Image (spheres, rainbow, N blue to C red):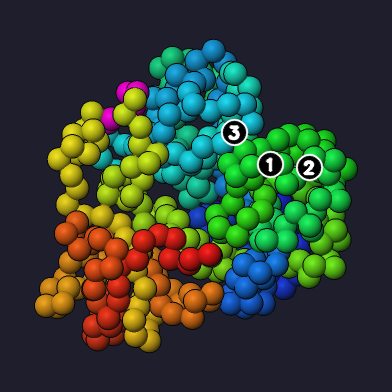
């Protein structure tokens, strides 16, 4: 199995930086360099850089590009303007989710879909299967590196590297420009941390130059490389879904609280059934919760009500580095989903009191 593990472009650099490398989504990835808590705090309070080059990128072009995207995604991509990105998902025929993704609009007939690393092959097959209208498709996943420069000091750290005014790039908008002396870098106001910052897409051959320039530019602000461990705790504090944990082939976007990216102003894969589900309501919902006692919730731990009856299951859980308490997400029966509801999480045969909270769990 180990032989099939792919390496990202800067694999050897991360090893040299002391990154602890682990197999993740089919790639050898840095999980941490120092400690998860230290790296988490670096991103929340300063600036850190994730190498997330394992993510997948598909180009969709031509006169039928939008038609294909509208068919396979739940959000309404016709609303995008050039230079804007949109969070969306691929619904499947049986009510679940093939993957969640970001759609970028480069030009009237040119889009990029950014998908999860673990689903690249599955998503590529899915999009091709539905491409009955003949849109031009290209899988460029193996040619691009992606760095997420995240934290409140991100602009200050890297503004010197580009003539683009970074403070003018709005959330979920992007531009293509010069960055660290490299042309045609996609500079995007996106990220999965809730701490602000950018994601930059560069060609593999420019990856090392850009990475080193970013660290040189941000050294006075104590910029640090950040691993997947902190990425996970940062996204949990925000209540952002992780595919394979909180959403999968069996979970409906409406159950997952993704009704806001499910637009019935158009027809898409399984839209009729999802529309019916919206009208009749769902039996379970994805919620965020905060423990009221000491303990760490983990995936698959039971969620119980006051009477001790199982009402759901944890999908993601951790000790929040920012808040110092156990937090998590999970599905519960709809009648228990309202913020403020008292529940308990079964941790090592003990029911620990918890409360359902409106997302994000970390209040600014």
Residue at x 58% of width, y 77% of height:
37
- Choose mark 3 or mark 2, whichever is in front: 2
User: Which residues are drawn in magenta?
Assistant: 266-271
Residue at x 42% of width, y 55% of height:
241
Q: Which quadrant of the view contains residue 128?
A: top left
- For the residue carrying disc 3, how many other residues have a C-alpha within 10 Å: few (<14), some (14-19), or many (20+)? many
* Residue of label 3: 84
* Residue of label 2: 165
Q: Is residue 352 above or below residue 70?
A: below
Q: Is residue 156 above or below residue 134?
A: below
* Residue of label 1: 169
Q: Seen in the image, is 137 located left or right of residue 156?
A: left
Q: Position of residue 140 (x, y in %)?
A: 62, 35
Is residue 18 visible to the viewer in this orientation of the structure? yes
Which secondary structure, mark 3? strand
Q: Which quadrant of the view contains residue 272?
A: top left
Q: Position of residue 48 (x, y in %)?
A: 69, 63
Residue at x 18% of width, y 44% of height:
281
Q: Position of residue 129 (x, y in %)?
A: 40, 26
Q: Position of residue 13 (x, y in %)?
A: 76, 62
Q: Seen in the image, is 196 located left or right of residue 258?
A: right
In magenta segment, residue 73: no
Which secondary structure, mark 2? loop
Residue at x 41% of width, y 43% of height:
99
The answer to whether marks 1 and 2 mark residues whose Cβ atoms lie closer than 8 Å is yes
Q: Seen in the image, is 231 located left or right of residue 146?
A: left
Query: Along the polypeptide, which appears first: circle 3 or circle 2?
Result: 3
Give the main secondary structure of the magenta stretch: loop
């Amino acid at each position: 199995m180990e032989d099939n593990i792919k390496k990202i472009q800067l694999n050897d650099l991360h090893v040299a930086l002391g990154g602890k490398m682990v197999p993740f989504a089919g790639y050898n990835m840095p999980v941490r360099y120092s400690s998860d808590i230290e790296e988490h705090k670096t991103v929340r309070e300063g600036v850190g850089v994730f190498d997330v080059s394992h993510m997948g990128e598909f180009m969709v072009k031509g006169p039928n590009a939008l038609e294909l995207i509208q068919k396979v995604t739940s959000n309404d991509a016709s609303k995008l303007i050039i230079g804007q990105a949109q969070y969306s998902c691929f619904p499947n025929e049986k009510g679940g989710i093939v993957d969640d993704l970001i759609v970028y609009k480069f030009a009237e007939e040119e889009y990029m879909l950014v998908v999860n690393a673990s689903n690249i092959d599955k998503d590529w097959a899915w999009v091709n299967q539905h491409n009955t209208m003949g849109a031009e498709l290209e899988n460029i996943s193996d040619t691009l590196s992606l760095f997420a420069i995240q934290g409140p000091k991100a602009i200050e750290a890297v503004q010197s590297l580009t003539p683009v005014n970074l403070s003018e790039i709005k959330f979920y908008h992007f531009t293509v420009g010069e960055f660290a002396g490299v042309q045609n870098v996609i500079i995007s106001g996106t990220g999965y941390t809730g701490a602000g910052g950018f994601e930059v897409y560069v060609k593999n051959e420019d990856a090392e130059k850009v990475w080193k320039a970013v660290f040189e530019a941000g050294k006075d602000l104590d910029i640090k490389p950040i691993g997947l461990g902190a990425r996970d705790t940062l996204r949990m504090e925000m209540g952002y879904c992780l595919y394979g944990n909180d959403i999968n082939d069996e979970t409906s976007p409406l159950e997952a609280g993704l009704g806001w990216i499910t637009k019935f102003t158009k027809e898409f894969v399984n839209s009729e059934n999802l529309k019916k589900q919206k009208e009749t309501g769902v039996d379970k919902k994805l919620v965020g919760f905060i423990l009221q006692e000491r303990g760490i919730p983990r995936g698959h731990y039971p969620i119980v009500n006051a009477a001790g009856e199982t009402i759901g299951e944890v999908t993601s859980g951790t000790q929040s580095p920012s808040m110092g308490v156990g937090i998590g997400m999970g599905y519960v029966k709809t009648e228990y989903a309202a913020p403020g509801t008292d529940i308990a999480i079964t941790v090592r045969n003990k029911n620990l009191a918890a409360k359902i909270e409106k997302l994000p769990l970390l209040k600014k």
